[in-house]
Image (spheres, rainbow, N blue to C red):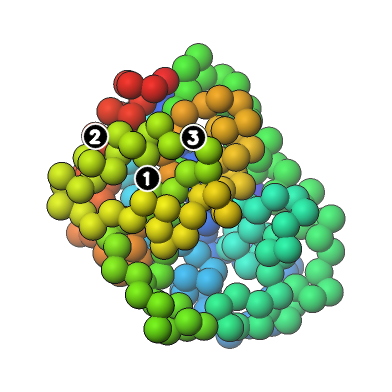
Amino acid sequence: MNEAYHQIDGGDLNLLIVADHASAHVPADIDLMIDPALLNEHIAVDIGVADVSRALAAQLGCTAILGGVSRLVIDLNREEDAPGLLPVMSDGHPIPGNRTADLTDRMARFHHPYHHRLSQLLDGMTSPFILSVHSFTPKLASDPDQQRPWDIGVLYNRDDRAARIAIPMLEAAGLKVGDQLPYAGTLLNATMNRHAEANGIPYLGVEMRQDLVGDAAGQARFASILGPVALECRSRLA
């Protein structure tokens, strides 16, 4: 297994599940100088995403690619010149070990191989569709008064084709849906901007609320809802 990503080969359907922040792993030779308990928190990993992505890959018969390291090691969903690429602070928590880290080394070791593999997988598909899976915390420590009541958010930048299909379907499944909420894909959509929008590949970007996918039952529920939505988007757009 490549340390930059974990690939799940669930089948040959031309649909790629992408989970940038699926892992809380920090390699043994990297010291972030933080309390290890923080690796279980949203600042380190998108809680629930790995298991939902695995379930979806098996359910749909498709490939999934999961980021192999914590977003605190390198943020795979950031442009190569973005300020948060190598975070020194996250939701009020300092990450002291990153202050003297070698960004070039982290990029070569994790960021470049991850995105190269994504490009390879998409190049191998005749009519690809991407399902981008993230999760969000219902409460930010740095902004405790901010209300985040949505069950799921749908994010996009310029290409909202799949969003327009997915939002009514997610609402019909009983979910409270945020359209460009809890934040907008116009501001944070790096992986999809690079691999989907820049290449005309249709995609659906979702953000699941972490307290709803923190256990096996919640993960199974969201996978069962998202699977048909992703297939409908793909059949109409890819």
Task: Single out the mark in the foreground, 2 or 3.
Answer: 3
Work out whether residue 3 or residue 165 is closer to the camera in this orientation and state it: 165
**SS at circle 1:** helix
Circle nearer the N terminus (3, 1) = 1
Task: Single out the mark in the foreground, 3 or 1.
Answer: 3
CA separation in Å, label 3 and label 1: 26 Å
Residue at 21% across, 54% down: 175
> Where's residue 198, x and y in %?
63, 31
User: Which residue is label 3 attached to?
Assistant: 159
> Where's residue 111, x and y in %?
70, 49
Asked whether residue 214 appears in the rendered view, the answer is no
Quarter-of-image position of residue 88:
bottom right
Residue 108 sits above or below residue 131 on the image: below
Asked whether residue 38 appears in the rendered view, the answer is yes
Circle nearer the N terminus (2, 3) = 3
Circle nearer the N terminus (2, 1) = 1
* Label drawn at residue 228: 2
* Label drawn at residue 54: 1
Residue at 55% across, 40% down: 192
Quarter of the image with the C terminus is top left
